[in-house]
Amino acid sequence: MTRIKLKDADAAVRRRIAGRPDLPDAVIATMATDADAAVRHRIADRIGLPDAVVAMLAADADAGVRHRIADRIGLPDAVVAALAADADAAVRRSIAGRPDLPDAVVAALAADADADVRWLIAGRPDLPDAVVAALAADADAGVRRRIADRIGLPDAVVAALAADADADVRRRIAGRPVLIDGEWYI
């Protein structure tokens, strides 16, 4: 068997090694700390990463590595929570699109500074009424439009959206029959 150095001076060689399917966990853990972000990207894309490596890469200095981890299936709740608070909005957007979010993470992302994160949360079918109400009053009209398209809105939310400053929000509410306190609004 030929031996290849994991710390080869050529990053392209290390990237090729990182893509090998037969790497033992110890080598994967070592390569997850490589100075070259592209090597860490290759490691982050691997199937069956050990939880310790997933947690380490979720805290990586490179947002691209963290983004790749955010897209993984079956992340531990602690990793999901950490990535939901990530400084990079693209990472938070990846987390916001996940179907398996704990309620606390959904609530935190519903108040995120990035409107695209809130828009993604607004499209979730499992939102608690309090989160729906908060997003119906969001500063971003796109978030309010997404809420206006929901089925089964609480009466107070329908009434608020029917009087929204944004004409498109009002049109979305006006375009469907709504029963509020026994009276149809069409």
Image (tube, rainbow, N blue to C red):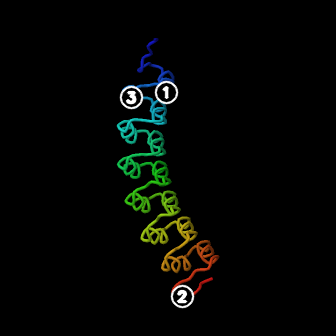
Residue at image position (40%, 25%) is 24
Q: Position of residue 11 (x, y in %)?
A: 48, 24
Q: Disc 1, disc 3: CB below 8 Å? A: no
Instruction: Identify which amino acid the numbered label 2 is placed on.
Output: Gly
> Does label 3 or label 2 sit earlier along the sequence?
3
> Does label 2 or label 1 sit earlier along the sequence?
1
Q: Using a 10 Å C-alpha cutoff, classify the residue at mark 2 as few (fewer than 14 neighbours), some (14 to 19) or many (20 or more).
A: few
Q: Disc 2, disc 1: CB below 8 Å? A: no
Q: Position of residue 28 (x, y in %)?
A: 41, 29
Q: Position of residue 114 (x, y in %)?
A: 47, 57
- For residue 179, side relative to residue 81 (left or right): right
Above or below residue 106? Residue 168 is below
Q: Position of residue 157 (x, y in %)?
A: 49, 76
Q: How far apart are the two marked residues, 1 and 3, measured between alpha carbons? A: 11 Å
Q: How far apart are the two marked residues, 3 and 2, measured between alpha carbons? A: 63 Å
SS for tag 2? loop
Front residue of 122 and 114: 122
Q: How far apart are the two marked residues, 2 and 1, measured between alpha carbons? A: 62 Å
Q: Which mark is residue 157?
A: none
Q: Using a 10 Å C-alpha cutoff, classify the residue at mark 1 as few (fewer than 14 neighbours), some (14 to 19) or many (20 or more).
A: few
SS for tag 3? helix
Above or below residue 33? Residue 135 is below
Read off the residue under disc 3.
Answer: 25
Question: Residue extending furthest top?
Answer: 1
Above or below residue 127? Residue 33 is above
Instruction: Identify which amino acid the numbered label 3 is placed on.
Output: Asp
Front residue of 90 and 21: 21
Read off the residue under disc 2.
Answer: 182
Residue at image position (44%, 48%) is 88
